[in-house]
Amino acid sequence: MAWQAASSSSGPAFFASRETSLQTVTLGATTKVQFNSEVFDTDNCYDSSTNYRFTPNKAGYYQINATCVVSAGNLTVFRVYIYKNGSYYLGGNDINKNNDAYAGGLVSAVMYFNGSSDYIEIYAAPGGLGAGDIMTSKSTHFSGIWIRS
Amino acid sequence: MTLTELIIKTYPELTDKDFGVFGIISLRNDGDGVGDYIEKWEYSKPIPEGLTLGKPSA
């Protein structure tokens, strides 16, 4: 009997957040969240400077999480979405704010990636009129980890 | 004035529920410098003059 090689039981993991500046967004527009700071990115699969997307290099199922905090003077509703390969894939919870100033949304899912071309991005959809800001902190974060093949 | 506000100015009957992935109008921004654009327009009235459907070239 032989032990299975350890390398077959591990895969990419990353954690990125919005740290260096507020991201201004238009209320009413579904906007890609730019998580511009990496806490860790074991296999360099997250792009934190250009496309802000996770493109895992190992096929399999991944646990994906994202949270986002937005500030606006007249925010009415807020949602956070996962986009896969450029298109809407699934959405998180609806936050009804009734013109409050802050809202935090989250989205989470187990997703399959082919390990080559599949990628995901996080979009925020704040409702209302005017502009808002995606806040900086690890409360605005995007993370994922390979679970199994 | 934001893209949402421009559309509301033309069609003040529209509400929050009309916008978004599940609404009849979807506005999108890919954070690539292009800015906000109309991704989907399923409203029964035409797109306001001066606006276009789809992502413009960067």
Image (cartoon, coloured by chain):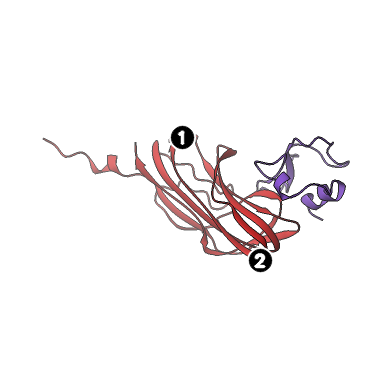
Q: Quadrant of the N terminus of chain B?
A: bottom right
Amino acid found under the numbered disc labelled 2: Ala
Amino acid found under the numbered disc labelled 1: Ser
Residue A84: mark: none
Helix, strand or loop at mark 2: strand
Badge count: 2
The residue that mark 2 highlights is A101
Residue at 75% in and 49% down: B15
> Residue A72, image x and y in percent?
68, 63
Residue at 53% in and 52% down: A48
Q: Is residue B58 visible?
A: no
> Residue A16, image x and y in percent?
49, 56
Where A141 falls versus A56 (above or below)?
below
Pair 1/2: label in front:
2
Q: In the rendering, what colour is chain A?
A: red
Q: Quadrant of residue A61?
A: top left
> Residue A67, image x and y in percent?
52, 56
Q: Is residue A111 visible?
A: yes
Residue A116: mark: 1
Give the CA separation, mark 1 to mark 2: 40 Å
Residue at 73% in and 47% down: B36
Of residue B43 and residue A121, the one placed in the foreground of this image is B43
Q: Quadrant of the C terminus of chain B?
A: top right
Note the chain letter of the purple one. Answer: B
Residue at 49% in and 48% down: A46
Of residue A86 and residue A5, the one placed in the foreground of this image is A86
Crowding near the residue tagged with mark 1, few <14, some 14–19, many ≥20 C-alpha atoms within 10 Å: few
Crowding near the residue tagged with mark 2, few <14, some 14–19, many ≥20 C-alpha atoms within 10 Å: some
**Residue farthest toward the left in the current orientation of the protein:** A1
> Residue A20, image x and y in percent?
58, 64
Q: Chain of mark 1?
A: A
- Label whose residue precedes the other's in the sequence (1 or 2): 2
